[in-house]
């Protein structure tokens, strides 16, 4: 379990996050939602230790993350950034192999190769295995980076907008893959997801952020309500419950957006 | 890679034996010393440029562009000014060499603080600052030069262009030792370098202690630059040329391919320049001028193209 207590982050005098408290339970998929600039990426990068908090504590299974060595932390938590870029000419397979670095430290074993193959197969990237990262589409690159984080085989995955650049089919495929990771492999997944319908239909918990603080947190049915989301985004919306799941319609507005 | 290796072997044999009259007493040992200097210098230039570009995340920056060599020349000018012509005697080969290494490491700390600690800069900014630094330090050096006597000036002149003629066997031995130690220390970072090329965040999340490696590698680069500059002189834009040619020629951009290839390219350039001076230009030009001319022109082309992209 990852627990965030009284977390604050500011750049200079400008507070970005203040007094953030949240819990992310093990073996579950938690979605982080909220408007642009709410501080979702900042929170995720603080958990990933890519940013240092101004104050506050983050613990993983009761241990303060600041006390763990970089190398050990990478065996427990894998991170996919919002806009992963790569200015190196690499094949998809080489990139995914980098995910094994925390375990292999550069010397690949048979086990490492197995994990790489599994991650590639898991996201159906077989046909792109030898393609170069800078010669595939944005969505395919996103998938390749996700495969790298999966190959890392960590208990916890932090994914910043994993659906970025993906078409409907691939987005569904990724969300199903994330569910498999939680349900069958017991992984903890925290993902920033902008598409409220994906968040509502695939997550166990939702943490909604607004203006650098947690606006609402809880199970899907607790957070995804017309009034709650309306207030979060400042939009009129309608939630339609269907047999296959719920559907949030925010496409038509009565007046100009608030 | 194999082609490069064979090419260099052929050039080396040509360089050592052609026109030597098979004089094993003087000419051939002398040429072998020069050849060794080219190899050690080439390795130092190739490694330092490519590794620096990787940690800077920028393909038009090299230690030379960031002012390392200018600082070296300033140090030499100051030494000549303070200690006079005897500076070489007083400090001896090692004294000067160690002073240079210390100076380079100190300068690395400045670069480290400014380039890697602050907020992320866009690609063009460090280049501009580097060139301005080089110019400012160069002007200081000129200022010092004007205060030294012509005799001292002649000594100093010797430092400021690439040349293999002044290489002394003892110094060569030291340099080889240092480069070997650096390679040994750096070889454990070879896999890490590939990850560092992905940037700080990606490297950190894959378990690389980024800050520690940046410090270690900048330290090793400082030693390499001190070795190459004191052994064969300032290489100016050569590093950029070598590194980018290595990226272009290599099929993979993994460091275990680009680093050796970069070294081979640097050695090859030294050999070609030296052979051209001896056989084409009949000593009417120097290796330094040839290399600066070729690489400077290429650097200009690169910055122009870089401006188009940025
Ligand atoms: N390096 C930085 N320096 C100063 N301010 C920053 C920095 N990075 C982010 N911010 C500010 O922090 C706030 C939160 O940014 P963050 O990236 O966490 O938002 P987000 O919720 O991920 O938004 P999005 O949905 O657009 O990705 C923004 O107002 C942004 O301007
Ligand atoms: Mg974000």
Image: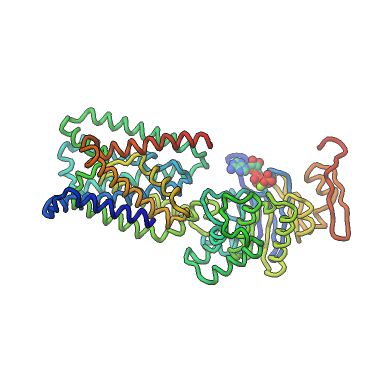
Q: Is A167 positioned to the left or the right of B178 in the image? A: right
Q: Residue furthest bottom?
A: A110
Residue at coordinates 76% horizontally, 61% vertically from top-left?
Answer: A204
- Point out residue B54 in the picture as x, y percentages from the top left corner: 45, 49
Judge whether residue A237 can be spotted in this image.
Answer: yes
Image quadrant containing the N terminus of chain A? bottom right
Between residues A181 and B211, which one lies in front from this camera angle?
Answer: A181
Residue A233 vertical position relative to residue B212 in the rendered view, above or below: above
Residue A201 vertical position relative to residue B92 in the rendered view, above or below: below
Between residues A176 and B5, which one lies in front from this camera angle?
Answer: B5
Residue at coordinates 77% horizontally, 55% vertically from top-left?
Answer: A198
Residue at coordinates 32% horizontally, 33% vertically from top-left?
Answer: B138
Residue A123 vertical position relative to residue A135 in the rendered view, above or below: below
- Point out residue A28 in the picture as x, y percentages from the top left corner: 71, 63
Residue A202 falls in which quadrant of the image? bottom right
Between residues B147 and A58, which one lies in front from this camera angle?
Answer: B147
Image quadrant containing the C terminus of chain A? top right
State how the image is colored. rainbow
- Point out residue A210 in the picture as x, y percentages from the top left corner: 73, 46
Residue at coordinates 35% horizontally, 60% vertically from top-left?
Answer: B184
Q: Quadrant of ligand 1?
A: top right
Q: Residue furthest left?
A: B25
- Point out residue A78 in the picture as x, y percentages from the top left corner: 60, 59
How many numbered badges does the structure rendering display?
A: 0
Residue A169 falls in which quadrant of the image? bottom right
Judge whether residue A57 can be spotted in this image.
Answer: no
């Amino acid at each position: 379990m990852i627990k965030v207590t009284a977390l604050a982050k500011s750049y200079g005098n400008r507070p970005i996050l203040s007094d953030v408290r949240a819990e992310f339970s093990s073996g579950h998929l938690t979605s982080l939602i909220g408007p642009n600039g709410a501080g979702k990426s900042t929170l995720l990068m603080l958990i990933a230790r890519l940013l240092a908090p101004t104050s506050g504590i983050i613990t993983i299974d009761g241990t303060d993350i600041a006390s763990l060595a970089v190398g050990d932390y990478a065996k427990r938590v894998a991170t996919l950034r919002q806009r992963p870029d790569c200015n190196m000419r690499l094949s998809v397979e080489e990139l995914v192999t980098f995910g094994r670095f925390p375990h292999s430290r550069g010397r690949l074993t048979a086990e490492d190769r197995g994990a790489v193959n599994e991650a590639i197969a898991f996201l159906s990237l077989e046909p792109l295995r030898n393609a170069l990262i800078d010669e595939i589409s944005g969505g395919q690159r996103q998938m390749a980076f996700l495969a790298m984080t999966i190959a890392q085989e960590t208990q916890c995955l932090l994914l910043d907008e994993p659906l970025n650049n993906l078409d409907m089919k691939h987005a569904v495929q990724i969300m199903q893959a994330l569910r498999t990771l939680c349900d069958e492999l017991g992984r903890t997944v925290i993902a920033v997801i902008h598409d409220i319908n994906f968040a509502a239909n695939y997550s166990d918990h939702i943490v909604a952020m607004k203006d650098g603080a947690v606006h609402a947190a809880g199970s899907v049915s607790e957070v995804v309500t017309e009034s709650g989301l309306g207030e979060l985004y400042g939009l009129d919306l309608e939630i339609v419950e269907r047999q296959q799941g719920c559907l949030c319609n925010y496409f038509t507005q009565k007046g100009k957006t608030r | 890679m194999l082609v490069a290796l064979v090419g260099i072997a052929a050039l080396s044999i040509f360089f050592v034996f052609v026109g030597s009259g098979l004089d094993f007493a003087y000419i051939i040992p002398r040429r072998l010393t020069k050849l060794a200097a080219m190899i050690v210098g080439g390795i130092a230039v190739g490694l330092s440029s490519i590794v620096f570009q990787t940690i800077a995340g920028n393909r038009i920056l090299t230690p030379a562009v960031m002012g390392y060599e200018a600082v070296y020349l300033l140090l030499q000018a100051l030494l000549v000014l303070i200690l006079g012509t005897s500076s070489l005697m007083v400090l001896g080969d090692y004294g000067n060499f160690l002073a240079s290494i210390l100076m380079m490491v100190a300068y690395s700390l400045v670069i480290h603080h400014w380039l890697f600690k602050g907020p992320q800069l866009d690609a063009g900014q460090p280049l501009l600052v580097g060139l301005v630094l080089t110019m400012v330090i160069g002007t200081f050096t000129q200022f010092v030069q004007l205060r030294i006597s012509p005799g001292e000036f002649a000594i100093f002149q010797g430092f400021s262009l690439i040349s293999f003629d002044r290489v002394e066997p003892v110094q060569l031995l030291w340099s080889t030792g240092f480069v070997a130690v650096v390679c040994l220390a750096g070889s454990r970072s070879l896999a890490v370098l590939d990850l560092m090329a992905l940037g700080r965040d990606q490297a950190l999340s894959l378990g690389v202690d980024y800050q520690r490696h940046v410090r270690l590698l900048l330290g090793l680069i400082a030693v390499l630059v001190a070795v190459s500059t004191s052994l064969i002189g300032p290489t100016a834009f050569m590093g950029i040329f070598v590194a980018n040619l290595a990226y272009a020629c290599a099929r993979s951009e993994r460091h275990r391919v680009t680093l050796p290839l970069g070294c081979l390219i640097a050695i090859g350039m030294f050999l070609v320049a030296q052979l051209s001076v001896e056989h084409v230009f009949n000593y009417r030009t120097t290796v330094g001028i040839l290399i600066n001319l070729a690489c400077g022109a290429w650097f200009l082309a690169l910055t122009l193209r870089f401006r188009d992209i940025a």
